[in-house]
Image: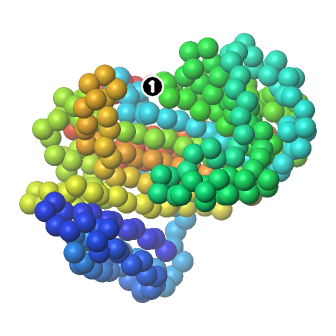
Amino acid sequence: MCLIAWEIQLKGMASMSERPWRRTAIPQRPKTEATFAFESATIRIMTASENAQPTRQFVGFPASPRVIYAKNPLISVACQIRFAPVLRIESEVPAAFQELIRSDYPLLRETSATPENFPAEIPPPVAAMIKAQLGAQHNRRRFDFISQDEHWTTTLLRDSLTVSTRQYDNWGNFKARLNQSLTALNEIYRPAFFTRIGLRYQDLIRRHKLDLSAVPWRELLQPRISGFLIEPDLSVVVSQGEFAVKFGKESGQVQVRHGLVQSTDKNTDAHEECYLIDSDFFLEGKISTDGALESLDFFNVQSGRLFRWCITERLHVAMEPTQS
């Protein structure tokens, strides 16, 4: 079954906080259909489909040429490997692990995995109580190994290893960094298997950096994700969507969150309406430590195809692609 939900807010109407949307379960239907619900400023479209006969297994998004964008929309790429807790990571300083990666990650920051900040609406006494309880139960040590330019971070906890960057250029470089940290993990701590592997891409489309400030979103995004943004007569100020796609039992799935966001220029403090496509690919189960990179290679290929599947040719060209 496939489920897609859209939510928007229209200018000049009451805010959603005044008339909250009540979430209800969507009944399964024998065929695809759309349900429209109108309440105050909110319009929500929900579609659900379920075939009576078994559906074909989805093997991947449509193939597209591998490219590198000169005007790269990626703002963050992260790979997280989870495994059964290794108490040794918390009971001793990971000096041996650090030595294996220190040439590329000379900086170290040790913190606690317990949240330090809570939303402003939570009263301080309540936040302090929650923090104390979390600290007693989950005060785990966290080690951030950081590159000299501070563009790359390898994070080690007792049950996970994460490699992340905000300066992604290509999969080859990212994979080399990841393999270095994975090799150190396997050599020093020897997890029996992995319980989850994930690869997450966050693309932020900023129209002004592409000389497309006056171009409406409907000319840059495919209708399959743009929702009400394709309607020229609607002035949409909030548009968010989410969907999940399974590739098969052994191949994992992807959770995609997308929608309009506000971005602030650090130099000018100017605000801009941007579009975020947040794709989280993952596989769960007992995963061989030798098979993680193969699954991640598959996720990488699918991430490029998914992004291309979401955008129009006009946006694709504006980002100045070159064959990788």
In this rendering, would 231 be left or right of 183? left
Quadrant in the picture for the C terminus = top left
| Residue toward you, 40 or 214 | 40
Q: Residue furthest front?
A: 125
Q: Residue at x 39, y 78 (%)?
A: 22
Q: As displayed, is residue 261 above or below residue 21?
A: above
| Residue toward you, 22 or 44 | 22
Q: Which residue is drawn at 72% across and 40% down?
A: 112
Q: Mark 1 points at which residue?
A: 324
Q: Which residue is drawn at 80% across and 22% down?
A: 98
- Colour theme: rainbow
| Residue toward you, 143 or 112 | 112
Residue 191 image-quadrant placement: top right
Q: As displayed, is residue 158 above or below residue 146?
A: below
Q: Can residue 190 be seen in this view?
A: no
Q: Position of residue 75 (x, y in %)?
A: 44, 33
Q: Residue at x 55, y 50 (%)?
A: 118
Q: Can residue 208 be seen in this view?
A: yes
Q: Position of residue 49 (x, y in %)?
A: 42, 77
Residue 35 image-quadrant placement: bottom left
Q: Where is residue 205 in the image (x, y as percent from the top left)?
A: 32, 38
Residue at disc 1, secondary structure: loop
In this rendering, would 217 be left or right of 3? left
* Neighbour tally class for label 1: few under 14, some 14-19, many 20 plus, Cα within 10 Å: few
Q: What residue type is labelled 1?
A: Ser
